Image: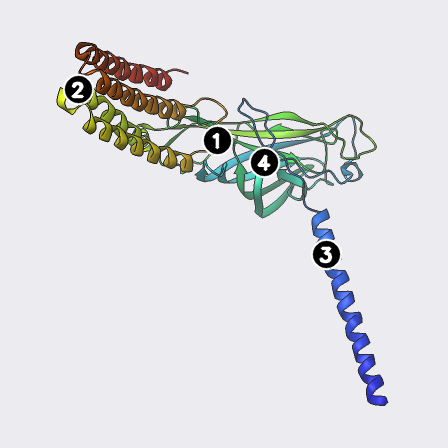
């Protein structure tokens, strides 16, 4: 009896432990889900605009930094030390920079509340605060993987505007107002990316409006946050990349062009064989480009080269078929049709893609 009761007691204790553990696991899972920040991709510059990231909902920021008619002015600057991993397919780039905040509010700690709004992930280290009278000088070194909507309409001769958006995620514009440090915000001279030329760098402050109050009872309609926008303008040096990116289309166009100048005896089977080779070359180039580039909402240079190449191939196949069916009954018409279509096809291809390349 005693051993049986002892066994039952141990079993009950084990059940209680397992049940408690499962309850804790459920609670932890719920907590982690509750605290996952909501994200959207935020943009304030010129189109194209797509996805963006939104700051964390403010946790009643005015309880820490009270809202008033005179918000705390914070002078913010950046010094970029690294720029790397320009990733077009995954819509991102990596950046490292020092950022500093000058203000006179002893209750405000920007390192704890400032965020990079359009970052997939970010971290800060070497935080330091120095007091000079009433002025607080706060600085830290940030590293981030930033979301970027690449404009590839002119790839590989594209100009890109890389944006870094910085906001205080805990206090809106009525409590914290950023002021851009345009004099000291710069890019280190050692920052270089092969194949790219850095054209300019600037910082500015804008008001970022959100169509929600995040449940703040002091607000209605929308909330406004002071946002620092750092913009790097970069131009791709693309002639070598142009040749390597579109080599398959170039080969296909040359094969098609040659077929129009073949001798009379070669206008059937050999011509079809060369067109088949052009098709394979174009399809391979298309697959390669799809892996290199992201989707474009506009008709791009790549789209133009791809479409015009396949059109030339279809014209060549159609002309060869016309020649084959009319070479005996109407040889002169077949020969003239071949010559005219060939000239128009070559000239049209060169003019169309030249306009796409050198305009806009």
Q: Which residue is mark 2?
A: 261
Q: Which residue is mark 4?
A: 118
Residue 69: where, in percent of width, then height? 78, 25
Q: Position of residue 124 (x, y in %)?
A: 58, 46
Give the spatial CA distance, label 1 vs label 4.
19 Å
Query: Is residue 189 visible from the viewing direction of this image?
Result: no
First of labels 1, 4 by sequence position = 4
Q: Nearer the viewer, mark 2 or mark 4?
A: 2
Label 2 vs 3, first from the N-terminus: 3
Q: Which residue is at 71% across, 40% downward?
A: 108
Earlier sequence position, callout 4 versus callout 3: 3
Question: Based on the displayed image, in which of its 4 quarters is residue 45 positioned?
Answer: top right
Q: Quadrant of the N terminus?
A: bottom right
Sequence order check, earlier mark of 2 and 1 = 2
For marks 1 and 3, give the CA distance: 39 Å
Residue 42, relative to residue 9: is it above or below? above
SS category of the residue bearing label 4:
loop
Mark 3: few/some/many CA within 10 Å (<14, 14-19, 20+): few
Q: Give the crowd class for mark 1: few <14, some 14-19, many >=20 residues within 10 Å.
A: few
Q: Which mark is residue 28?
A: 3
């Amino acid at each position: 009896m005693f051993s049986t009761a002892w066994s039952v007691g141990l079993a009950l204790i084990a059940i209680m432990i397992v049940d408690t553990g499962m309850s804790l696991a459920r609670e932890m899972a719920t907590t982690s889900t509750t605290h996952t920040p909501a994200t959207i991709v935020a943009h304030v510059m010129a189109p194209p605009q797509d996805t963006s990231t939104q700051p964390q909902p403010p946790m009643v920021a005015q309880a820490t930094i009270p809202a008033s008619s005179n918000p705390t002015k914070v002078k913010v600057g950046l010094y970029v030390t690294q720029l790397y991993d320009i990733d077009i397919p995954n819509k991102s780039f990596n950046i490292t920079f020092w950022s500093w905040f000058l203000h006179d509010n002893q209750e405000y700690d920007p390192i704890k509340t400032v965020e990079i709004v359009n970052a997939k992930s970010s971290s800060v280290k070497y935080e330091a605060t120095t007091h000079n009278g009433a002025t607080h000088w706060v600085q830290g070194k940030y590293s981030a993987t930033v979301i970027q909507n690449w404009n590839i309409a002119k790839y590989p001769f594209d100009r890109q505007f890389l944006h870094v958006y910085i906001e205080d995620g805990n206090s809106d514009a009525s409590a914290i107002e950023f002021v851009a440090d345009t004099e000291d915000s710069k890019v280190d001279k050692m920052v270089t990316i092969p194949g790219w030329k850095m054209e300019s760098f600037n910082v500015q402050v804008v008001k970022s409006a959100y169509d929600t109050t995040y449940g703040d009872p002091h607000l209605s309609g929308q909330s406004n946050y002071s946002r620092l926008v750092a913009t790097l303008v970069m131009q791709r040096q693309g002639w070598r990349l142009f040749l390597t990116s579109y080599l398959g289309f170039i080969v296909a166009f040359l094969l098609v062009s040659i077929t129009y100048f073949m001798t009379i005896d070669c206008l059937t089977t050999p011509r079809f064989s060369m067109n088949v080779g052009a098709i394979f070359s174009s399809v391979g180039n298309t697959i390669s480009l799809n892996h290199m580039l992201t989707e474009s909402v506009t008709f791009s240079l790549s789209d133009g080269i791809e479409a015009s190449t396949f059109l030339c191939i279809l014209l060549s196949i159609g002309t060869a078929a016309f020649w084959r069916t009319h070479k005996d009954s109407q040889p002169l018409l077949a020969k003239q049709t071949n010559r005219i279509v060939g000239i128009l096809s070559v000239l049209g291809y060169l003019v169309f893609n030249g306009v796409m390349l050198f305009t806009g």
